[in-house]
Amino acid sequence: MSMSGKSFRVLGERTARKDGLARVRGLERYASDYYLRNMLHARVLKSPYPHARVRSIDVSEAEGLGATVITFRDIPRVRFCPRLVSTPEATYKDWLVLTDRPLYVGEPIAAVAAESEEEAQRALESIRVEYEVLEPILDPLDSMRPGGPQLHETILLGDEEVRVEGNLACRLEVAEGDVEKGFGEADVVLEREYRTSRRYHSQLEVKSALVNPEPDGGVSIWCTTQTIHNTRLLIHEIFGIPTSRIRVYRLPLGGSFGSSIHTNLVVPIAVALALKAGRPVKLAYTREEDMHDHSSYQMIFRLKLGAKRDGRLTAGELDMVMDIGAHQVQAYPLLGCVVGWWVSLYKLPSKRYRGRAIYTNKVPSCAMRGYGNPQTTWMVESMVDELAEAVGMDPLEFRLKNYVGKGDIFWGQGPTVKSVIESCGVEEILRRGAELIGWDKRPKPGEQRGRYRRGIGLGRGFHTSSAGAAVPGTVVDYSGAILKVNEDGTIDYITAMVDQGGGSLEAHAKIIAEELGVPLEVVNIVAADTQTTLYDVCTHASRGVYAGGGAALRAAREVKGKLLELAARVLDAYPHALEIRPDEELGQGIIYARGVEGKEITIGDLTTMARHKNWGTIASAVSFRPGSCPPHFTAFFAEVEVDTSTGRVRPVRVVAGADIGTVINPDLAEGQIHGGFAMGWGLAVLEDTPYDPETGDLLCRGYITDYKVPTAADMPDVEDFKVFFVETHEPTGPFGAKGLGEAAKNPAAAAVANAISNALGVRFYELPITPDRILKALREKG
Amino acid sequence: MEINRVNTRIIPFRFEYHSPSSLGEALTILSRYGSEARILAGGTDLLVDMKQRLVEPRHLVDIKRIPELRLLREDVGGFIIGSAVKLRELERSEAIKGRLPLLHEAVSSMGSVQVRNMATLGGNLCRASPSADAAVALLALEAEVLIAGPTGAKRVPLEGFFLGPRATLLRPDEILTGVYVPYPPEGAGSAFIKLGRTSLDLAIVNIAAALKLRGGIVEHCRIAMGAVAPKPLRLRNIESLLSGRELTPEALEEALGMVEASIKPITDIRATAEYRREVSKVLLRDALKTATERCGGRRS
């Protein structure tokens, strides 16, 4: 049921996902499970220095061992951006596939392919490289200072060459309203600095690519990716292979969390090796290589907010510096999103923002579930708690007074993607959540004295569902769906959209079954690739259900119209008077005229008849651009217990509420929120990738022994983790649905941080809030 | 360079694998190859070291097929645990749980189920990690290690076995065949506590304490800590301070005051030295408290 009073047949039901058994039994085949006959195994030679120049490179011994070897000389010197989601004028290009000027420990210099992994490894170790070691810069604030090492002299913006000054990769300034006046009207003004960490995605599937060179000069690619079409476009851009001859297969993904929005370097490296060897080449990263491949964005915020005594916000100013590592994946669009995340939480009559992205000699940063929103939300929600305290207001009421909700302008994915919010369950989430956690019984900050102190914290947030908008903007966002009806009454669903593992395609199948009136079992999610699908931009921005489902729904509507049209001919009835019902016994849909006995035909019989009568295939192909990117809302109420002797924090209870519009898969949706909380917990108290100042390498050197993520045992018991969904209907979404993947995480860290502060009466301005930092803060407090 | 020599998907160098079925055969192989050989038991440490290129043995001697090293049996006044007995076997043994709860508690905290299904008790000792959980428990239990070599067998206290990180008394031609663990005194209580970054972690600090009280007076006291010095440490000075005394708040404070001088923690990626010093005292207090509560056979 939804708020609109509509009742659904399939949506909202607890159904087993089609790929579920294969996934849990280990039978699903991911990119690294693919093998081809005659395949070579590849290894990458990585820079051991954070900043260096390659003086010479001798590969003769490796070639003598029979290996195929490539260096930067073997690849077209095309500077590119691995992420093709933005339009050219918003895309900075500073990458090479293989480089002679490495900018981080782990940057690929050369690669080999040989008959076995062992032979490839031996060949790799025989390559001799002479480096000119350059001074590295690891801290973003140091990097901005004049006179230090410069990482890039010039980079490309679209096709235009631009100079890089002071390692400033890109910047964005946005202002609206009179900020000085706004602060002048405020009764309370707070200004604070907040620092987040650099985290590793810890996705289960590490990056992998298998490339087969085809006789026509093209390539076939099986790889880890969130976007098969953009992978194809990038390989064309670098190698000039005709787009139509690059075939990228859609594969199941073992999680990615944003680490494969861009095309991974393993793909062009494997392409270059395969082209040179004339044989299939597989390149699969080890976990350690994967950790040297990507990380999240570290952000340093300076935030100033003003509020009147009645709790109304008057003005805001935000200065953000982010450490993006050695290359830009999507730093520029992120600068826009950060201001979007910031101003879309609470109404700010006037605001000013400056965002700067800074190069450092570290592993390149890329989106990580929430795309800067978890960091921004932690900052805002921390200060909102402090502001509420300063004006003497309940933090929950303060939030209700200021939140951006229904009818408000929503900045979505930044200042260029604006829309009006049409569905919003924030108030219900907060009121119900407060009741379930016992908000009014929470302790007063700092009043507890014992060793173990408990606190309750609130964090609320949102994320966009897709990056759609009424106008084109600088972000590409559309999806495609093809449906065809088979002679047995089953429906083939063909899409380029990748399922990250969260069940997006399962949701599409349910949307199609709902619209067509057929059993869920007859909708087949069929294997697909770039040659057989319509374009889909990428599975990111929590757009899987909303945008991909939007395309699927429209394709289903077209097919339904055709089915009814043909059935009307057969049944001697009017198409608009016909309906479809599922017949579980026959295992397919039946088209019938309501109330008229005998006037019915199964979809299978109709399709077969259409074949005999040469009416053609009943099919549709739809390309769909969402006209907005509605926010889905969440809030976490977390209760934690702090051991003030050891500084350890333990989650005691969690209440999470979400407005995701129509709930399509309740179990999967709930699972998203559990997982989102775990990632938020890691951000709040655990995760970071510090660097060794001596070597410039990751201190953990890529070993997960020393990059800890929370396990199930570190989370509250399932009985102590309550998830609820409020009933809303998003008019622009398929059957009223919105996204979920990222808001499932965004405010979790804020809730945890606020709970710790509630327990201890101490605020923390740097993440993660480790036991060490807690003990220090308690000592300083005395 | 290091980063290019590591390939954790494979063992990136050649070695010869030996799988003797008797202790004598194993000793002969070790004598033949000396320091070129390494003993393989569960492999949860050794294979990681090999993949990381920290060691590159030319010969691996797998001792898992030697029956006597797989035995877990009661002996006079204690247990003899074969060096190739899996941690999971100890965890699942009712006898160990009942008679050596301290060891059981330590072993159950180690790694994941998958790791415990492979890792062996002997391996945990021979790796000589400063944070080895089982070693800390066995020190507090005053275990002895059984060593076989070309000239015969010997039995030495575990405390003298560790020389430093990754270094033990064991010579290249010797094998740790087992551990003798005496039962703690009747009515003693014990506690093992470990602090990690998550529930699945190596210890930032760990502690094992065994205590027996008679009429409120400490009659037996054994304390060992890990990850606070180059090797797992027995805190004898604190043991003797507490022995023969009542566990008053004053006695406890005195004991806690001795902790800092007894340990030499370092700063690493897991924690700072300062943090380790701080929580060592907390762990000692907690361990003594729990061990006291468990005295007289009560154990939650």
Image (cartoon, coloured by chain):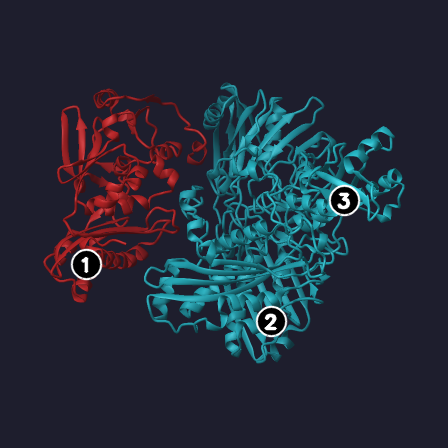
Chain colours: A cyan, B red
Q: Secondary structure at mark 3?
A: helix
Q: Are marks 1 and 2 on the same chain?
A: no
Separation of residues labelled 1 and 2 (CA atoms): 54 Å
Along the line of sight, the residue nearer the viewer: B90 or B114: B90
Q: Position of residue A344 (x, y in %)?
A: 64, 64
Q: In whole angstroms, how far apart are the C-alphas of marks 3 and 2?
A: 40 Å
Q: Which residue is mark 3?
A: A556
Residue A757, picture quadrant: bottom left
Q: In the rendered structure, the residue with mark 1 lies on which chain?
A: B
Residue topped by disc 2: A400
- Circle nearer the viewer, 3 or 1: 3
| Nearer the observer, A669 or A260 | A669
> SS of the residue at dot 1?
helix
Residue B258 disc label: 1
The quarter of the picture where the C terminus of chain B appears is bottom left
Q: Chain of mark 3?
A: A
Q: Residues within 10 Å of mark 2 (few under 14, many from 20)?
A: some
- Relative side of B286 to A404, left or right: left
Asked if badges 3 and 2 are on one and the same chain, I answer yes
Q: In this rendering, is residue B5 above or below A654?
A: above
